[in-house]
Image (cartoon, grey):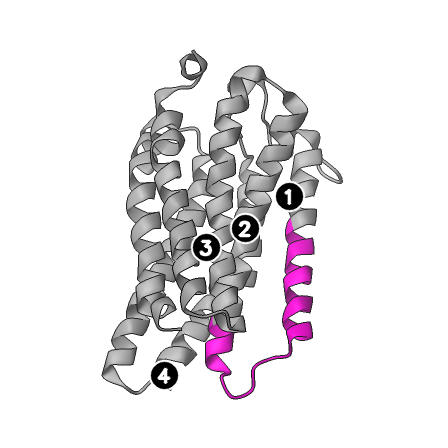
Amino acid sequence: MMLQNIDMIRILSVLIPMPFISVVFLYLAYKILTRSRSRISLTLSFFYVLLGFSTLTNIAFLLLIPTELDILLYILYFFIAFVTIFGFIFILIFIHNLLNIESIYSFKKYLFFIILYGLCCFLLLGMFFLGIGIDPELRINISNETSWKPVYSWEFLIVVYIFFSLSITIPYLIYSIKLYKKFEDKNLKKRLRFFILGIFGMTIMFYGVVLFNTWQNDLFKALWSILVIFIMIPSAYSIYYGIGQNL
């Protein structure tokens, strides 16, 4: 009965792939932690754990839609959005650690950057969830009018794209190039290419999800619902098998 109020696109994009994706992410985190519990392995595992829980919460959000519990739905979706964007800082720190094996930053410095990035994510999302300091029409809309689908404004998409690109994507590219130049062994370079490809896939996934909730185009939504599983799972494994399994 609950699924009667959920359209087919949401079933294809959430209920079918997300449980499998969650299991894959949490399983890879488990594999990393069973091999090693060093700071660098914990950092990569945090990335997998956060995205795994984010997808699980997305399932809970979808199943709660028929209840129309406004406040709870907003809280859940804020958690999903925050954990998703926040999780990417850990893979960035992971790459930075690889670049600085001999002189790894102190725990306090990394913790400072994690807290700073998390605070920026919280304020950015909070501003568009609550409409503080912006036009109320630019708020993220989750209501009966949207069939309880999160609908983003194009202004939100632009702000998030700029923020994510400057804080995550561009540093990814810079660190990845430096890391590739640092490795001389051909086998290591090959593994690193898989790792970089996985990161590229995960960033594409992030940009795509934001566009999915912004562009109200049924054809794009249907195509993305299929593509997302073919992007997320191979990318997650590519990151793991590129470098993660050898930690």
Q: Answer yes or no: is residue 214 visible.
A: no
Residue 162 position, x and y percent, is: 55, 54
Residue 173 position, x and y percent, is: 43, 69
Q: What amino acid is labelled 3 in the image? A: Tyr
Q: Is residue 70 left or right of residue 99?
A: right
Q: Disc 3 or disc 4, which is closer to the eye?
A: 3
Q: Which mark is residue 181?
A: 4
Nearest the camera: 222 or 91? 91
Magenta part of the chain: 95-121
Report which quarter residue 20 is drawn in.
top left
C-alpha gap between disc 2 and disc 1: 10 Å
Residue 227 position, x and y percent, is: 30, 41
Q: Is residue 50 left or right of residue 197?
A: right
Nearest the camera: 101 or 246? 246
Q: What amino acid is labelled 1 in the image? A: Leu
Could you say whether the residue bearing mark 4 is in a helix, strand or loop?
Answer: helix
